[in-house]
Structures are given as C-alpha cells and as structure tokens.
DNA sequence: ACCTGAACACCGTTCAAGT
DNA sequence: ACCTGAACACCGTTCAAGT
C-alpha cells in the first residue's frame, strides 16, 4: 500500500514567500532542524525545488525568515510595547521574558539558531525589537542611560541562554524516545547527579533534589528576578 | 596540476578516538560546523570512513566528544576547583566565567551546540562540572542551600547565553567577508541602530553609541557582576 | 581487532525548458 | 513572471572484503 500523501494533490492557491516560510515553520516544529529539507518542502507544497528558489534565495535565508516570523509573533503577544505602565516595569520584564521563553519552548529548533539569527539580523531583524522592548523597561526601572546597554544585554543573554537550554533539554528528552517524557528526563538526570562522587561533586549532589522538583517556568522567572535584583542593586536606589 | 594534498601521505601512527576528536576540533575551528565532514576527516587522517566509524558511532557523537574535549580544557584552566579561597568567590566566578567565554570565542562552533550537548550529557558529561565549579562559589558567597540551584543556573545561563551570542556575532562578522572585521561589524550594526525610526526605537537608538564603543570582555563581565549583585541582594546580607 | 573503499540513500542547489 | 523537474556535486552511513 502506497503512503497516503494527502498533500500531493494539486495546489490551488499561489506559492508565496509567506506560505513557504509557514510550511518551513511547520516542518521545523514537527521534526526539528533535520526535518526542514527542500524535498519535504516541495512535497508539502506540491511543487518543485525551483519554485521555492524563485521566492527564497537559499536554505539559510529560509531558516532566518522562519526564526524572524516566530519571534516577531512572540514579541507581539507581549505587553503593548509602546506604552509601558511606569508603575510595573518589573512585571513587564517578566511577561516579555516569559513570552520569549514560551516561544522557544514551542519551537525548540530556535534554541540552536537564535544567536546566529540575532547576529545576522542585528541591524534589521528581530534583535532591535527585543532590545527595545526590554530596554524600555530597564529605563523605567530607573537605570541611568549609561547602564541601559549593559543591563538590557544581561537580561537578553540570560533569557536566551535559559530558554535555549530549556528547549535543548526538552528536545533531548523527546529524542530519547516516547517512553521517557520530560519528568522522566529530569528524574534520571537528578538520579545521575546523586550518583556522582561525593568528593568531586558535593554541591551538584546536593542540588539534585532541587533539579528533580523544580518547575521550569518558576525556575526561569527566578533567574529573571535575580537579574532584575542585580540591576536594581547596581543602578537604582530601590 | 593536481592539488597539493599534503596530508594524503601514509599515516604512521595508529588511528585512535582521541586523534579523530582532535582532528574534528581542528576542522570545526577552521571552517565552522559546515567544515566537519567525514570526507574532510578521512582526507586529513589519511584513512577511509569505515576506519572512523570503527572508533566513533556517528557524527552526533563525534560533535559531542569535540564539545566535551574543548569545555573540559577550559574548565581545567580555571581556578583550582577543589580549594576555593573563601575570601574571593566573586573573583573566582569572574575567572571561571571568563574562561568559558574565552573558550566559546576560540571555538565559535560551540555557540550553536553547547545547549544541546549540555542537555545530552547532563548526567555524565560536562554539565555537572560547570555546575560544580560555579556552585561552590555560590555557596561560598553565603547563599543558603535552597538558593544554590536557582543562583547557579542563572549564572550558567547568563554565561552561556552571552558567550554564545558573542561567538555568533564573531562568526557572522567573519562570514561577511575579509573586508569586514569585528569592529567594522560593530560599527555597521551601531550605524543601523542609529538609523532606526526614532518613534519606534528610541531606546535602541540611544544604546547605539555604547554598542559601538563597548569592549566584549568588559561588557560580559559587567553582566556577570550584575547577576552576582542580584544573588547577593537576594540571598546574602552583603 | 582494525582498516579499506565502493556503494546507497539522501541532501542543497542549478538551470534549461516550459507556461 | 512564475514554475517544472532532471541533473550535479555533495553528504552521512553501511558493509563485504581484506589484513
């Protein structure tokens, strides 16, 4: 019996760059970075490789466009970026950070590529929007202008580092097979930490319990709060 | 005229897993993740693919081994991990962080893979060593045991996020061609930030000057200090 | 036990040809 | 202007065969 191949019927709507990017995001979500191939894309879009190359210059650009689309969406879902309420910048930083965290967890393939994409599009792409959203709250926190760049960068780097690590953990747990889910992955890692040599790893061993029991979002927000506390202690009176 | 191919002469020493990993690191350093292929590896080691597969199960494992080797080296170069001087945990955190930062900058291919490798080898690999080295200093800072995991994680995530972004920036600058070096990359990014719409990006525009003038290491350490200040403010008296 | 190298099933990308 | 699909130069991995 031949595979169903439900998408192979003739395409009715025209091929556009947006439709290609959308299909790329779907493939990435379903099967990770390995899942995005021009063959899979042509099959899903019922077309040939040449048609895709008409709209998109190459695979790197396609990956960049997919990253851009998904991050832009996450930022748009955050608090209204043009009118921060000056009484709650801390809450807004938490909300924005959590939005990025959630987006990276929804699209784990972002983890390995976000840094590269931010570097590539540092001028025109998504980086200025992230820096602007968080930078405004840093300003509202009372940080003087000389500190904006350091404080905002620290926030961005923490958020991307933590979210990236989280997504990588999730991807690893998933790749270990369907018998090992997220909590099973945490459990087995915690058990391994507890089994380390007490001479060499006293601190890691005593962190194992917290690793096992922690909630990802809570842990992530705890780190955001730590960075915020550092910003306040360093730059502002209270 | 045939290409020189200076490495193609007969191999004198035996093939070992270590030599393969070493060659893999060299290829990654020279040409990035795209530079690591089994063909390049067989040519450089004067052997066939089957020989490599005898020592290494597949490319993913080879990449993991290369990451492990390079991070282990960076950690070993840090302050002696078994006897932290309790009077200077702050300085030791800075030194350890800077060691990781430098390693990732020396080997930019780490940027895209470190999160995945940490997740993979969370039990046996390099993650426990990073958490142990930084965790001991967090303990020495006076943080109570309940805070060790959150504080250490925040530090690790900031360090990996910042170093990863920095390496990605460097890789992008390099890939833009030999006419654009690191400072040229910063300059053109700063200029682009200054050219953004003043209505939409007031804060980013005013950060452009600091972006142009900043020193990477200083900026990185400034972030480390911010996180440390947050840890102190949250968990310790002073 | 360790290595060889041809072969397989892929992959991104190009391009002459069609409409 | 937009699309087709065969073809090209790769890639990771396998495996019968050698030593």
Image (spheres, coloured by chain):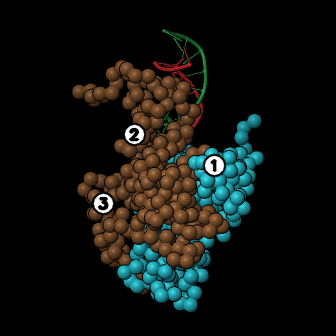
Chain colours: A brown, B cyan, C green, D red
Q: Which residue is mark 3?
A: A182
| SS class, disc 2 | helix
Tell me: residue B85, above or below residue B207.
below
Mark 1: give few (<14), some (14-19) or many (20+) Cα within 10 Å: few
Q: Secondary structure at mark 3?
A: helix
Q: Where's residue A7, x and y in %?
A: 33, 27
Viewport quadrant of the N terminus of chain A: top left
Q: In this view of the protein, which residue sits in the foreground, B172 or B187?
A: B187
* Picture quadrant of residue B166: bottom right
Q: Which residue has dot 1 on it?
A: B198
Is residue B216 found left or right of B228 in the rendered image? Answer: right
**Count the marks: how many?**
3
Q: Quadrant of residue A189?
A: bottom left
Left/right placement of residue A149 relative to residue B58 reads right
- The mark lying in front, picked from 1 and 3, is 1
Q: Residue B145 occupies which quadrant of the picture?
A: bottom left
| Labelled disc at residue B217 | none
* Image point (51%, 38%), residue name: A62
Mark 1: secondary structure: loop
Q: Position of residue A14 (x, y in %)?
A: 44, 22
Residue placed under numbered mark 2 in the picture: A27
Q: Nearer the viewer, mark 1 or mark 2?
A: 1
Q: Looking at this view, is B182 or C16 the one in front?
A: B182
Q: Are tags 1 and 3 found on a single chain?
A: no
């Amino acid at each position: 019996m031949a595979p169903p191949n439900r998408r192979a019927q003739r395409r009715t709507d025209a091929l556009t760059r947006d439709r290609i990017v959308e299909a790329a995001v779907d493939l990435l979500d379903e099967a990770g970075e390995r899942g995005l191939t021009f063959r899979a894309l042509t099959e899903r879009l019922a077309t040939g490789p040449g048609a895709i190359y008409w709209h998109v210059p190459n695979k790197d650009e396609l990956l960049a466009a997919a990253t851009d689309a998904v991050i832009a969406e996450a930022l748009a879902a955050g608090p209204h970026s043009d009118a921060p309420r000056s009484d709650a910048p801390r809450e807004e930083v938490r909300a924005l950070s959590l939005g990025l965290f959630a987006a990276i967890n929804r699209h784990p393939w972002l983890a390995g590529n976000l840094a590269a994409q931010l570097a590539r599009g540092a001028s025109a792409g998504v980086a200025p929007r992230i820096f602007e959203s968080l930078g405004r709250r840093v300003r509202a926190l009372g940080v003087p202008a000389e500190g904006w760049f350091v404080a905002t960068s620290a926030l961005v780097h923490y958020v991307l580092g933590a979210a990236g690590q989280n997504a990588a953990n999730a991807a690893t747990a998933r790749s270990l097979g369907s018998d090992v889910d997220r909590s099973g992955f945490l459990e087995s890692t915690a058990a391994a930490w507890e089994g380390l040599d007490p001479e060499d790893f006293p601190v890691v061993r005593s962190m194992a319990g917290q690793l096992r029991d922690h909630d990802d979002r809570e842990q992530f927000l705890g780190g955001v709060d730590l960075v915020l506390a550092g910003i306040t202690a360093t730059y502002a009176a209270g």
